[in-house]
Image (cartoon, helix red, strand yellow):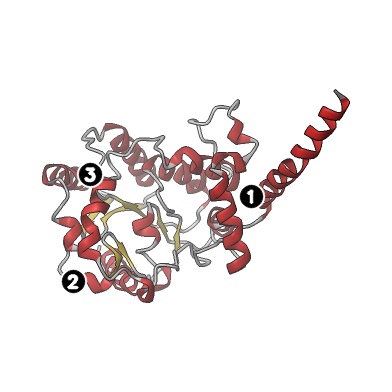
Amino acid sequence: MKKLIKNLVFFLLPILLVLSLIECFYRLVPNNYTLKNTNIQKIYDTTEVLILGNSHTFYGLNPSFFDKQTFNLSNISQTLYFDQLLFEKHINKFKKLKYVILNIEYTSLSQLKDTEEDSWRKYYYKSYMDLNVPIISKFDYGNYFLSSTRPFNKNIKLVNSYFIEGTVIDCDVNGFGINYTKEKRFLNIDKIAPNTIRKHEDNLFDFSENISRIESIIRQCKEKEIEVILVTMPVSKAYSVRVNKFKLDKIVKTAKLFENKNSNVRYLNLFNDFKFTNNDFYDPDHLHTEGAEKCSLIVSTFLDNN
């Protein structure tokens, strides 16, 4: 029996050591979430524009090309649920905030608060951004072991990427995503667009929960005399022609209704804007860094024309 226990310990020890090292990696190595959480606290006194949203604004709106001091708090697959949590955590600490930019796009209004993408990201928001995330139970194992929230092969891939690149951060100090460059863009955008839209289509038309979240943000902004800019980001034509037209129309009408009902809301719809061509996109629905410069200048000008 003692020999069996001894052999079992020798077998498990390397595994436990590897798992412990991976957990230390998750706890100690800076990432996009920790960077944004640290940097936003340094600019409470100077920021005039706050950008929220998912990967479309993360890769599509570069604060460097805004006339006003701007910070991008958006992130990959960030839902309106987390937009609201982040907004409420930080809003009372800003001294000069004049504008909040919210991304209203094809998936955002129908997106649920605990999606497959959130199965691990929600722990990042809690651990790395000091958020109280109500959808996470205090008994949830992921609260205590971040490395357990993703498959082992994903953990190894992330660690390997860190040792190759020297970092897992792929945004700049202003929170803008920098790794979707023109040089790396997909050349077959028209070909891959049908598959992209199939992955994005959730076939959901109930916007009520996310409408309530946006209304709450608008109401709090109005109390502080902050303007809310709703932006539907541009996508390639091959993407736009394949979305459900009924759903798209409902999204646009909902955004316009926010604008019509609230004196502090304006809506900018760039979804099918003719100024953008395939040359501006990294893939069917994301701008590359040069396309983001064009889009950022358009949005910045829109802010000024009030």
Q: Tell me if 251 is positioned left or right of 34 in this view.
A: left
The C terminus - image quarter: bottom left
Amino acid bearing label 2: Lys
Question: Could you tell me if the residues under marks 1 and 2 are in contact, i.e. CB atoms within 8 Å?
Answer: no
Using the rendered image of the protein, determine whether residue 217 is visible from the camera's viewpoint.
Answer: yes
Question: Label 3 belongs to which residue?
Answer: 258
Out of 258 and 137, give the one closest to the viewer. 137
Label 3 Cα neighbours within 10 Å, binned few <14 / some 14-19 / many ≥20: many
Identify the residue under disc 1. Answer: 26
Residue 173: x %, y % from top left: 53, 66
User: Label 3 vs label 1: CA separation?
Assistant: 40 Å
Task: Point out the frontmost of discs 1 and 2.
Answer: 1
Counting residues from the start of the chain, the first of labels 3 and 1 encountered is 1
**Foreground label between 3 and 1:** 1
SS at circle 1: helix
Q: Which residue is mark 2?
A: 275
